[in-house]
Amino acid sequence: MSKIVVITSGKGGVGKTTTSANIATGIALLGHKTIAIDFDVGLRNLDLVMGCERRVVYDLINVIKGEAKLQQAIIRDKRVENLYMLPASQTRDKDALDPEGVGRVLEQLKEMGFDYIICDSPAGIERGAQMAMYFADEAIVVTNPEVSSVRDSDRVLGLLNAKTSRAEAGGEPIKTHLLLTRYSPAEVERGEMLSVGDVLELLGIPFLGVIPESKAVIQASNKGAPVILDEMTDVSQAYIDVVYRFLGQERPHRFIEIEKRGFLKRIFG
Amino acid sequence: MEATSEARLVEQMPAFDIKGTITPVTVLRLYTTDVERIERELRARIAPAPQMFANAPIVIDVADLPGEVELSLPSLVARLRSCKLVPVGVANASGDEIVRAVEAGLAIVQIGIGRGRGVERPGVNARPEPAPVHVAAPAPVAAPMPVAKRAREEKRPDPKAADAEQQHTLTLTVKQPVRGGQVIYAQRADLVVLAPVNAGAQVIADGHVHVYGPLRGRALAGAQGMADARVFCQSLEAELVSVAGQYLLADEIPADRRGRPTQIFVENGSFHFLPL
């Protein structure tokens, strides 16, 4: 049984691509055959974050247009078994995406036995974003703890409930999850940032957890290795928790409160 | 010096603009030429809500008049004015009627496409067609209905039962949160939302708007002019509230009602916010 998951937000720069790379990597680490698809046609990034930009030959648009076979475009991750990615085109634009073509590619991926198909949505709510979400079974809505990001996520949740194949079929709606990224408990405490409670009250969907604001994310992107693999960092641990929760395991929430410096840390810190 | 140049500047500007507009107008559809009876029934009709009709423009629709007796327009106009209505035009006039309407200082108005002399009036027992109730995306802020459409929806002086029955079926219930960017319009109906209405969303009803959750977006009640329509909400955090075309922005909503269960209505032209 394959599951199509869209990582979306509406607003740009909140951490969709980072989240796509890390969740895909985490799920694959747990033994599920997983592929991450970059839907940001024209601004491809996911290949960089996943560190396979040098191996891109064909892309999603080539496959949709019949210029390449799906197998030729898929890139196998060198570090993590079971992990694959399908890059976006850098030269085309999002008009090259059409529902039939995208549907065909997703169907083929299912036949190839992928357990999880992670669709990295572009920012905005236009064609690219709508194509990324159209066939999704589940959605992870990535939000930053600030008002404009929350409002955009709200807009996207409305679209997920209206402009997707599940919504049009009138069957079971898309399962939505909230992921709060770039969270800083210290700023929340100072009243400079919305708290988890504020955001949950506004959006009212199941909560996957927080990813703390961290320099490690940028360092990891530049290195081209998803931060989840750098297990010493709190961001890695946060993403590991999120992956487990997404797969249905209960885990206590962390990184929401300011960390009390422990006795040992105060001595050796 | 400065005053003169300012005056010159004013003179250079055009004296006026001419703009087309669509305004809702109440239509008085006549079935008799007995002006005395018309006045009597009209007074009884507006007595319960005199404010709603005060200085309202009225179009006199003569399509359904029996041909035998001539209607005394000057007398009717005087009687309407005495009821504080402002007759502005005559609809479906023909021949001599047009001349007499113009003489009485009234405009000739086009309403009710396809209506006219000889078109059969629906029987007294004919039930109004079930009104379409739908979730749709109308114009961002519901515009007043064109005159023609409005005219067709005016209530007939038929038994009240039909009206009551019609109003009874008309409530649109929404159970899902209304998210930013979504518009829900309860046409000719009340709207009940059993979930939050988030910032950037719009909930619109021709009747009342009830929100059993926080109201953070825009709520427009009485979108087609129902002046006694109200907005009810569990927590008033709205960006805008409107009743029958009048509206208030977030900053104008009394601060002491913010975040509280509140009902909102317009009386004597001003907004009232009462605790629920």
Image (spheres, rainbow, N blue to C red):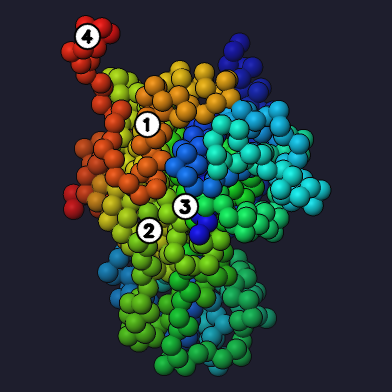
Task: Identify which residue is drawn at 46% across, 76% down.
Answer: B131
Dot 4: element: helix
Please name the residue that numbered disc 4 is placed on: A266
Where is residue A121? Give x, y as percent. Answer: 57, 42
Chain containing the residue with disc 4: A
Residue B180 position (above or below residue B129):
above
Distance, label 2 to label 4, CA atoms, is 49 Å
Distance, label 1 to label 2, CA atoms, is 31 Å
Chain containing the residue with disc 3: A
Q: Is residue B48 left or right of residue B16?
A: left
Chain containing the residue with disc 1: A
Residue B4 position (above or below residue B222):
above
Please name the residue that numbered disc 1 is placed on: A238
Q: Is residue B230 visible?
A: no
Q: Which mark is residue A138?
A: 3
Please name the residue that numbered disc 2 is placed on: B176
Q: Amino acid at mark 4?
A: Arg
B178, B121: nearer the viewer: B178
Give the mark toward the camera: 2 or 4: 4
Chain containing the residue with disc 2: B
Q: Is residue A73 left or right of residue B37?
A: right
Where is residue A39? Give x, y as percent. Answer: 63, 42
Contact between marks 1 and 4 (CB within 8 A): the answer is: no
Distance, label 2 to label 3, CA atoms, is 18 Å
